[in-house]
Image (spheres, rainbow, N blue to C red):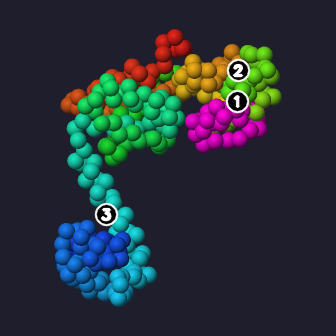
Amino acid sequence: MILSRRKLPPLNALRAFEASGRRLNFRAAAEELGVTQGAVAQQVRALEEHLGIALFQRLARGLALTPRGAAYLVDMTRAFDTLAESTGRLLVRPDMVTISVTPTVATKLLIPRLAELQTALPEVELRTVATEALSDFDRDQVDIAVRMTRGAFPADLEARLLFRQELVAVASPHLASGLALPLSLEQLRALPLLHDSHDHWPEFLKTGGKLPGPVFNQTTLALDAALAGQGVALACRAFVAADLDAGRLVQVTDASAVMEPDYFLVRKRSPSQRKAVDAVWDWCATRLALPQKAAI
């Protein structure tokens, strides 16, 4: 049953209850809210009368929540957290830019370049949201997204290709030591294979059926396992270019495979785009793209 908003308890009473429930002390709640202890106790008492339910047991040295009060506190804390987050987004500074990326893009491309971005755009505060879920630009308050998708976009979105998905097989030099590189696909099948959620190994090795090996829900975890010498990972060249250049990984076969979808930089079209968003967009288009020498 959903109560009419007009029948909801007063907001001040709910704030007093929520603070008192977290602190289990009227005095501590009063200090947090900047009011008197008596005012908090009075608000909580009024709330209990309004609901017809005892929310607290008054003890000699503080408070204890009743079972129904404890359940109510969980919901009230969640509601106030939602209000605080929503208000924070509303009051976001004009120089804050929110970018939504996959965990692998965050780990392998964005985080290693954060210092460079700060140097290039010292006036911008970048907020990074790492998630596999698709972003709703309005609902999630996202300015820019990097996603693996096909190149058909609605008219209200602007997109720029960052790089194609060229898959390469990589391993730690320690695992590859003693092997005559590059390996044939037949030799590669004999090595321990590390799988991510995309599971492109059967297509890459041109074989049917499931192949053995540990499975990770994110590509970045499979790459971490490869760096630790646990097996061979299959990943987009853009994500391993730095590790290949530094010698932390080696490409164990010359074979590669280009597979759709591709990686795009995406944002919502706006006639009055903020300068900070434009600056981060241009920086990402330049610095997150695959270097031309490795492009396909």
Q: Which residue is mark 1?
A: 232
**Horizontal and vertical percent position of residue 53:** 34, 86
Is the residue under label 1 in contact with that under label 2 (CB below 8 Å)? yes
Q: Which residue is mark 3?
A: 80
Helix, strand, or loop for circle 2?
A: strand
Query: Residue 118 got which mark?
Result: none
> Could you tell me how far apart the alpha carbons at marks 2 and 1 are, in whole angstroms?
8 Å
Q: Residue at x 50, y 38 (%)?
A: 103
The quadrant in which the N terminus is found is bottom left
Residue 103 falls left or right of residue 206: left
Helix, strand, or loop for circle 3?
A: helix
Q: Residue at x 45, y 21 (%)?
A: 289
Magenta segment, which residues?
204-231
Crowding around mark 2 (Cα neighbors within 10 Å: few <14, some 14 to 19, many 20+) is many
Nearer the observer, 114 or 286 = 114
Nearer the observer, 69 or 266 = 69
Q: Which residue is mark 2?
A: 252
Upstream in sequence: badge 2 or badge 1: 1
Residue 7 falls left or right of residue 221: left
Q: Residue at x 69, y 24 (%)?
A: 173
